[in-house]
Amino acid sequence: MLTYGDGVADIDINRLLDFHTDAKCAAVVTGVRPLTRFGELVVEGDSVRRFAEKPASHDGWINGGYFVMTPRIFDYIEGDRTALEQQPMERLAADGQLAIYKHAGYWQCMDTYRELQMLNQQWTAGHAPWTRWWGDEGHATTRLKRSA
């Protein structure tokens, strides 16, 4: 398992691991549909037919930054300078060795100072959706079936 560490999500790790086992691929990427940064207008001529403020992306799935991989991934990495998101992932997909775990729950990247502030505000207010598995005493309420 690996993550970039620049985002948070309420991914059910047990389901993700089970999906990877069933997929029988070298790698599984968690796909998400983030909220768009701006409102969306669907127009017809000069009329707005639909208005949606910051809707979830309808165009497709993006890399959510959470993965499960087998050691076969190393067959796709040429060296220390290989960027995982480029040739290895492209080759895995072309070879049918990359599956997507479609996560419809909470996901938020932290690529900007604005996103850092937003996540810190959620944490401070006690409304951090990515912590849904944690009990009041700070203990996990769901145990993993396997060790990481």
Image (cartoon, rainbow, N blue to C red):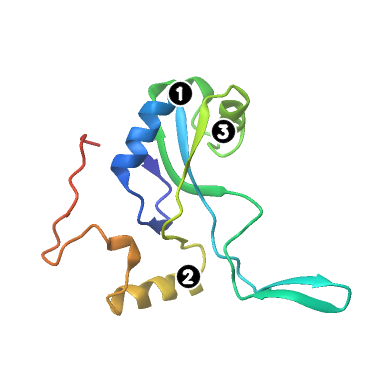
Instruction: Give how far apart the Cα atoms at labels 3 and 1 are.
Output: 11 Å
**In this orientation, which residue lies closer to the viewer: 18 or 139?**
18
Q: Is residue 87 visible?
A: yes
The residue labelled by disc 1 is 74
Q: Is residue 115 left or right of residue 129?
A: right
* Mark 1 neighbour class, 10 Å CA radius: few under 14, some 14 to 19, many 20 or more: few
Up/down of 19 relative to 130, above or below: above
Q: CA distance from mark 2 to mark 3?
A: 27 Å
Foreground label between 3 and 1: 3
Q: Which residue is mark 2?
A: 115
Nearest the viewer among 44 and 23 is: 44
Callout 2: helix, strand or loop? Answer: helix
| Left or right placement of residue 51 versus residue 126 in this view | right
Q: Picture coordinates of residue 64 (x, y %)? A: 49, 50
SS at mark 3? Answer: helix
Residue 132 or 71: which is nearer the viewer?
Answer: 132
Q: CA distance from mark 2 to mark 1?
A: 33 Å
**How many residues crowd around disc 3 within 10 Å: few (fewer than 14), some, or many (20 or more)?**
some
Query: Which residue is label 3 attached to?
Result: 89
In which quadrant of the rendered image does the N terminus lie? top left
Q: What amino acid type is highlighted by mark number 2?
A: Glu
Left or right of residue 106: residue 56: right
- Quadrant of image for the C terminus: top left
Q: Secondary structure at mark 1?
A: helix
Looking at the rendered structure, the kind of residue marked 3 is Met
Instruction: Pick whichever of labels 2 and 1 is earlier in the sequence.
Output: 1
Q: Residue, x 58% and y 49% (percent of image)?
A: 61
Say if 79 sits above or below 60 in the image. above
| Rendered image quadrant of residue 118 | bottom left
Task: Tell which circle, 2 or 3, labels the residue nearer the N-terminal end.
Answer: 3
- Image coordinates for residue 98, horizontal then vertical, percent: 52, 30
Kindly indicate whether the residue at mark 3 contacts the one at mark 2 (C-beta within 8 angstroms).
no
